[in-house]
Amino acid sequence: MALAALTSTSGSSTVLNASRRLRNGKSLGSVVPSSSFHEIRKNGYGDKNQKKVSTRQAIRDGLKELKQEIKNWTEEVKEGYTFDPVTGIPLPGEVDIQWSFNESTDFDNWVVTSDSDHNEGYSTSTLTVSPTGKGLFSGNLSTQLVKDGKVKRAGYCNFKSIRPQKSFKRDTFHDWSGYTHLVMRVRGDGRSYMITLGTAGYFDVNWNDQFHFALYTRGGPHWQVSKIPFSRFYMTSRGRIQDVQEPVPLNRITSFGITAGDKNNGPFRLEIDYVGLELDPSHKETSAYEQYKVPYFYARY
């Protein structure tokens, strides 16, 4: 599953390279504007259209970001002192909304991609506000292949949330460890969609770890509330279901997304009211899939 990645150049690496050029007696030339304190990601799709600016302008942009990041850090410190752990405990049967879609939703916090964005197909998609004032994920699916001799499968559209960050562009996680179910209020077109929970780890071998489960829609004019246990999500890496399954690490969620790719050509439409979490104390299952190890001698080790 190809998903666009938001990447930027590290401010620290820019300063290091500039100092090296100064020591060598060469001109500073031009550098890519830094989104300070954030190291470029080594996977995904980079922004090839990013314009280069002078070093002086890059420094000015960095100072502007520094002021805002200091302000964000101050707010985090205040929240840490005023946070009440008692009120932060989830209440059984109560849905805590994580994302709500309406006219005031900032869609810049979501990444929408399709195979046509990467010259891998002809599907298109958008994430906008519906006529009823809710989120609308819609577009057109096409399984037609690009005639380049490389692409073997096509026909997908998806959107996902950007990774949460703390001040100074530090990556962090959504902590859902106090919940047992994912709850969504949607109105679909009868298609099946795929829910994706990103759990990218620190090391590159874990960057593509994801957990999936199907979202079935009934179609028609009525809304539906889908309540899915986290124990039913299965693990994949680079689009392949893993032989050794494990429970979703709910304290390390990096993104939430939905994919349309049921191999049926034509338009699709999915309205979304909210995405929330719920605690069900009666749900004791941690993983719906077998958790065992095959003895070594079975594989002739």
Image (spheres, helix red, strand yellow):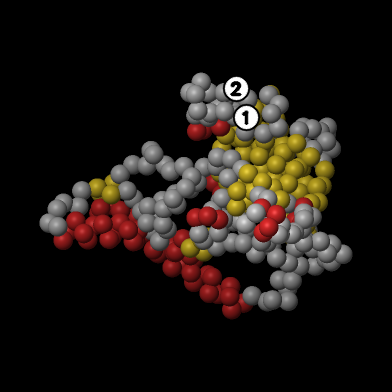
Query: Looking at the picture, does residue 50 appear above or below residue 207?
Result: above
Q: Earlier in the sequence, mark 2 or mark 1?
A: 2
Mark 1 = which residue? 155
* Residue 66 image point, x, y percent: 39, 63
Asked whether 47 or 64 is in front, the reply is: 47
Classify residue 142 by image quadrant.
Answer: top right
* Residue 9: percent from left, percent from top: 37, 52
Foreground pick, 286 / 282: 286
Q: How many marks?
A: 2
Residue 156 lies in what quarter of the image? Answer: top right
Nearest the viewer among 264 and 77 is 264
Would residue 103 appear left or right of 286 to someone viewing this image?
Answer: left
CA gap, disc 2 to disc 1?
A: 7 Å
Residue beneath disc 2: 144
Mark 1 closeness class: few <14, some 14–19, many ≥20 residues within 10 Å: many
Give the residue at x 16% y 61%: 23
Q: Residue at x 49, y 72 (%)?
A: 74
- Under mark 1, the amino acid is Gly
Judging from the image, what secondary structure is the residue with disc 1 in?
loop
On the question of residue 280 being in view, the answer is: no
> In which quadrant will I find the N terminus?
top right
Residue at horizontal 62%, vertical 62%?
252
Q: Quadrant of the C terminus?
A: bottom right
The amino acid pointed to by label 2 is Gln
Q: Is residue 23 above or below residue 147?
A: below
**Residue 232 in picture, x, y percent from top left:** 77, 52
Quadrant in the rendering for residue 276: bottom right
In what element is the residue under mark 2?
Answer: loop
Q: Report if the CB atoms under discs 2 and 1 are less than 8 Å apart.
A: yes
Q: Position of residue 130 (x, y in %)?
A: 69, 36
